[in-house]
Each structure stands twice: as C-alpha cells, then as structure tokens.
Image: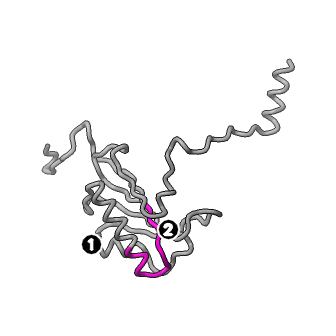
Amino acid sequence: MKLNGLINNSSDNNPTVCRGVRGAVTVKENSEEAILAATRELLQVLVKRNEMRPEDIASVYFTTTTDLNATYPALAARQLGWADVALMCGHEMDVPGGLPMCVRVLIHWNTSRSAKEIVHVYLREAQSLRPDRQNLPPVRPRQMNAMEAMVKVMASVL
C-alpha cells in the first residue's frame, strides 16, 4: 500500500509497532575479548531467531553486572555493523544472590510481530534468568496502614 509516496508493508491487522526483545548471556572473564565475543554471539542469535534487520532496530540498551567493566558491550553491535542504531550501556542492579558476569540487552525493534511472536534469548547460565512463568512467586497482598485497619475494625463492630 502506498501512503504519500511511501510503501507501507504492514496491513491494518499487523501494524508496525515498537517491541522489546530481551536477551542475556554470561561471560567467563572480565576481559574485552570475552565481553565482546559473548555479546556478538547473543546479538547474532537474537537477530537470527527473530529475523531482525538492523534498519528496523530503534535502539538497544545493554547492561552488565558490576563485575564486568573491561569494555562497553555496545561495541559488539558496532562490530556487527549497527552503525545507525542508538546504543547505550549501564550497570545492572547489584542484587544479593544475582547472577554474576552477565550481559543483558533490551532491543527496541520496529516490527509487525505480536508480543507473543517475539523470541527472547538467554544463553549459558543466563537461562536461569527466565523462569517458567508458572513458577513465579505469588504477589503478596497489599499491607493495610494503621488507619485502614482501624476503619475496618470499626466497620465490623458497628
């Protein structure tokens, strides 16, 4: 379909939207070579599994655990030819008991795929980051403050 001279490859049923694609990989050591090799591997698998084209990627946010600081993982994307993609790096929260030596990525991808069709990729020990959704811990009920508790007690007495 042509719109104002532009070709629109999506139908009304499958509009192009920005979707988040997640992935993570663990690294054996805090070295530039290890970080870049693992990140390139992760990005290549994400691209292949989702049939992505770099020109459809809006931006990418990389994080590393605080024990990885030898280089920016975004450099791996540049090495793969992602010259026009906005890239940013940061550190992941340092949560006690969290997975160490890990590079995570969030790709903002313009696609006509539904959220259920997106393939998220977790390699090596990072597979532990994506538990089966049925095994997620239950959400704790909201705690009442003292005033709410007093009103509830008074309402039950009256």
Quadrant of the drawing holding the N terminus:
top left
At 39% from the left and 68% from the top, the residue drawn is 87
Horizontal arrangement in the rendering, residue 86 relative to residue 28 (left or right): left
Local secondary structure at mark 2: strand
N-terminal of the pair, mark 2 or mark 1, is 1
Horizontal arrangement in the rendering, residue 100 relative to residue 75 (left or right): right
Horizontal arrangement in the rendering, residue 85 relative to residue 30 (left or right): left
Q: Is residue 75 above or below residue 6?
A: below
At 18% from the left and 47% from the top, the residue drawn is 8
**Residue 52 horizontal/vertical position (percent):** 27, 57
* Magenta-drawn segment: 24-37
Quadrant of the drawing holding the C terminus:
top right
- Mark 2 Cα-neighbour bin, 10 Å: few <14, some 14–19, many ≥20: many
Local secondary structure at mark 1: loop
**Residue 129 horizontal/vertical position (percent):** 51, 56
Find disc 1 in the rendering and name its residue. Answer: 81
At 43% from the left and 69% from the top, the residue drawn is 88
The answer to which quarter of the image holds residue 23 is bottom left
Q: Nearer the viewer, mark 2 or mark 1?
A: 2
Q: Amino acid at mark 1?
A: Gly
Q: Residue furthest top?
A: 158
Q: Is residue 30 magenta?
A: yes
> In the image, which disc is placed on residue 102?
2
**Residue 40 horizontal/vertical position (percent):** 35, 70
The answer to which quarter of the image holds residue 142 is top right
